[in-house]
């Protein structure tokens, strides 16, 4: 059966690289991953998080990719500078 899924760019890139290293197809990698997840009913997409819950700027999605918590925030140089200062960068 054919279907279309929308994946984050970074995840898709990592999946393609992994498939190439294993000398398999992206389809086989996706099937293998789905089978693993479906074997473990306690796993959920929202369970994966490495960013502290009190981080004011970022949270991680199910693939540990950092995303802004608040949508609609205009990213300005001032906002980036404030974030850098808070992170000590």
Image (cartoon, rainbow, N blue to C red):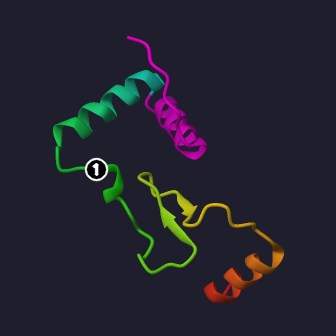
- Measured as percent of width and height from the top left, residue 74 is found at 75, 66
Query: Which residue is at the front of the view, 76 or 73?
Result: 73
Q: Which residue is rendered at x = 35% and y = 56% of the image? A: 46
Residue 37 shown left or right of residue 11 in the figure: left
Instruction: Specify the quadrant of the image occupied by residue 70.
Output: bottom right
Q: How many marks are shown on the rendered structure?
A: 1
Query: Which residue is at the front of the view, 14 or 42?
Result: 42
Give the SS element for disc 1: loop
- Residue 7 on the magenta segment: yes
Q: Is residue 81 visible?
A: yes
Q: Is residue 24 visible?
A: no
- Residue 21 on the magenta segment: yes
Residue furthest toward the right? 77
Q: Name the residue under label 1.
A: 44
Q: Which residue is rendered at x = 69% and y = 88% of the image? A: 85
Query: Which residue is at the front of the view, 29 or 61?
Result: 61
Q: In which quarter of the image is the C terminus?
A: bottom right
Q: Which residue is rendered at x = 69% and y = 67% of the image? A: 73
- Measured as percent of width and height from the top left, residue 82 is found at 72, 84
Q: In which quarter of the image is the N terminus?
A: top left
Residue 13 shown left or right of residue 23 in the figure: right
- Measured as percent of width and height from the top left, residue 38 is found at 22, 36
Residue 44 shown left or right of residue 4 in the figure: left
What's the magenta region?
A: 1-22
77 vs 14: above or below: below
Q: How crowded is mark 1: few (under 14 residues within 10 Å), some or many (20 or more)?
A: few
36 vs 64: above or below: above
């Amino acid at each position: 059966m054919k279907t279309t899924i929308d994946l984050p760019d970074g995840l898709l890139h990592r999946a393609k690289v992994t498939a190439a290293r294993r000398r398999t197809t992206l389809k086989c990698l996706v099937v293998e991953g789905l089978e693993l997840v479906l074997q473990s009913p306690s796993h959920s997409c929202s369970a994966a998080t490495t960013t502290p819950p009190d981080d004011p700027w970022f949270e991680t999605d199910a693939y540990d990719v950092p995303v802004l918590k608040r949508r609609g925030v205009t990213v300005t140089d001032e906002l980036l500078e404030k974030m850098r200062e808070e992170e000590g960068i």
